[in-house]
Amino acid sequence: MTTLIAWIAFDNKFAAAYMASDSRITWDSQGVKRWDAGRKIFASKTYPDILGYAGDVVFPALALSQLIEAFDANTMFNSDATPWERHEIIKRSLKDSYAHRHHTDDRDFHILHLSRWDGEPRATVHAWCLEYAAAGKAWTDRVLEIPTSTGIIERIGSGVPAAKTHERLWAATYSREIFSSFCDAISSGTDSLSGGAAQLAGFYPRGVAKTFGILRDSKAFLNGLPVHAPISNSTIEWRDHLFQRIDISTGKLLEGAQVHTRPKGK
């Protein structure tokens, strides 16, 4: 299935919001038949919006890639659309697209939507979980509560129990600890339906959403895809499993980047 999480980070005010997932696509209930490089998170290059999915793969993966391209071609909504307006259009578009399926199996899935409102006096984060339940052919749209200090917004998927266990081991109270505990949960193999490299996207108080590259065991990944380092002209931010800022051309920390460490016993 998947492990998909979203969280918000504060220093003394809102600093960032993130979404992370694993990269494993499975064709059986044990995770034996699998692909560990499947994309699950989609970040807009023109809006502070991020979409991710858990559950069934075919429809969400294809539909979200279409939606994000439509976002970035400015064909989905006006440039001044609010997060609530954007979410309603996303929801309607997904339902309309799903109605074009014919003689195919129905399976449950979840779509996580993370967004930002650039209002006054400060930017605010908003999130929703759109769920499809195959048994009743029913859609449910949940507005998610946003923490007022650094913390998890939502966890979805078969790997949630493992993610919670590793959060406790890390005493995950900082953004970097949330991400590191998430990576440990995936790497642990506790959930056989989650695996591969972590995927990460986020946004800050200003600007559009960003996709982050991941350095894992000295190998570079983008949206789950293995890419060949060294890469001297990369235009994105890179992080490792400790959430450290990486110079991907060298595989080492960026000059001046903060050093993060594991807690004792980890």
Image (spheres, rainbow, N blue to C red):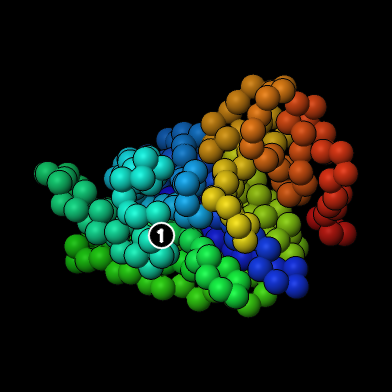
In the displayed structure, does residue 69 sit left or right of residue 106? right
Name the residue beneath numbered marker 1. Answer: 80
Tell me: residue 251, above or below residue 61. Answer: above
- At 33% from the left and 69% from the top, the residue drawn is 141
Residue 197 in sight: yes
Quick one: 226 or 76, which is closer to the camera? Answer: 76
> In which image quadrant can residue 62 be found?
top left
Rendered location of residue 162, percent (x, y): 59, 59
Quick one: 47 or 258, which is closer to the camera? Answer: 47
Number of on-image labels: 1
In the displayed structure, does residue 193 sit left or right of residue 236? left
Asked which secondary structure carries label 1, the reply is loop
Quick one: 256 or 111, which is closer to the camera? Answer: 256
> In which image quadrant can residue 246 be found?
top right
- At 77% from the left and 46% from the top, the residue drawn is 244
In the displayed structure, does residue 188 sit left or right of residue 76? right
Amino acid type at mark 1: Asp
Query: For the C terminus, which image quadrant?
Result: bottom right
Residue 164 in sight: no
- At 53% from the left and 38% from the top, the residue drawn is 223
Rendered location of residue 113, percent (x, y): 43, 59
Rendered location of residue 34, percent (x, y): 45, 36
Quick one: 61 or 14, which is closer to the camera? Answer: 14
Rendered location of residue 215, percent (x, y): 70, 36
**Pointer 1: residues within 10 angstroms few (<14), some, or many (20+)?**
few
- At 30% from the left and 69% from the top, the residue drawn is 140
